[in-house]
Image: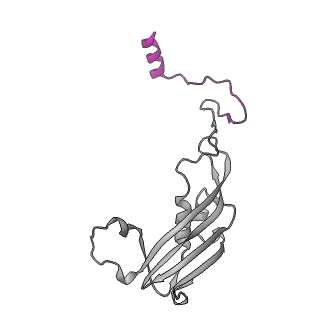
Amino acid sequence: MTIKISDIEDELAVKGEVESSSFQGAEESDIVFKTPVAYKLTVKKIGDVIVIRGSIGCTLSLICGKCLEEFLFPVDAFLDIELVPITLMPSASEIELKGEELDVNYYEGDEIDPDPFVYEEIMLSIPLKLVCRESCKGLCETCGVNRNYEECCCNELPHTILGEKLKSFLN
């Protein structure tokens, strides 16, 4: 989706869906978009600054880090970005940024493409530890059985040299 800055008088409401194929890098990862990305954004023009806020939603297919099963992950994120003309970008080679300046992005020309910001917000909403459910038991470290579906006959704690020395020390 592309937004022309000249079309924004004060505020512009943008609503629709974007196919995942429009996101660069989406096809290169283990993340699969199961639904198009639905968005409902408000674009405001405050002088030269463009503020984009709104909701983003989709469903992703991810791989559980414990049992290696595929699971669906619903994304319900909120986009809140501020875009400043690139001509206002500080030109110093080394500058110290303040906290509020870290959230500022820049645009060039008369068009803005919010797709990279939408994709980034979706990626940021994915947890670091991917687990299909809280009660996931994962795979057995010894035999590889998925403990969510069947019990294995392996010992709960594998024997290690350190464990054996600790056991002999305690006895």
- Does 165 lie within the magenta span? yes
Task: From this view, report whether residue 1 is shown above or below residue 160.
Answer: below
The image shows residue 44 at horizontal and vertical percentages of: 50, 80
Please name the predominant secondary structure of the magenta segment in the image: loop
User: Furthest residue to the right?
Assistant: 149
Q: Which residues are magenta?
A: 144-171
Q: Is residue 46 visible?
A: yes
User: Along the horizontal axis of the image, is 22 left or right of 99?
Assistant: right
- At 44% from the left edge and 12% from the top edge, which residue is drawn? 170
Left or right for 117, reference 61 = left
What residue is at 57 percent from the left and 82 percent from the top? 12
**In the image, is residue 28 above or below residue 93?**
above
Q: Is residue 148 above or below residue 20?
A: above
Horizontal side of 113 relative to 64 (left or right) equals left
Quarter of the figure with residue 77:
bottom right
Of all residues, the one furthest to the front in this rendering is 10
In this rendering, is residue 162 above or below 48?
A: above
Quarter of the figure with residue 69: top right
Which residue is at the front of the view, 133 or 160?
Answer: 133
**Which residue shows up at 47% across the image and 80% down it?**
50
Residue at the far top in the pictured view: 171
Image coords of residue 28 (percent x, y): 58, 62
- The image shows residue 110 at horizontal and vertical percentages of 49, 87
Rendered location of residue 75, percent (x, y): 61, 59
The residue nearer to you, when weighing 129 against 25, is 129
Magenta span has 159? yes
Corner quadrant of residue 97 = bottom left
Callout count: 0
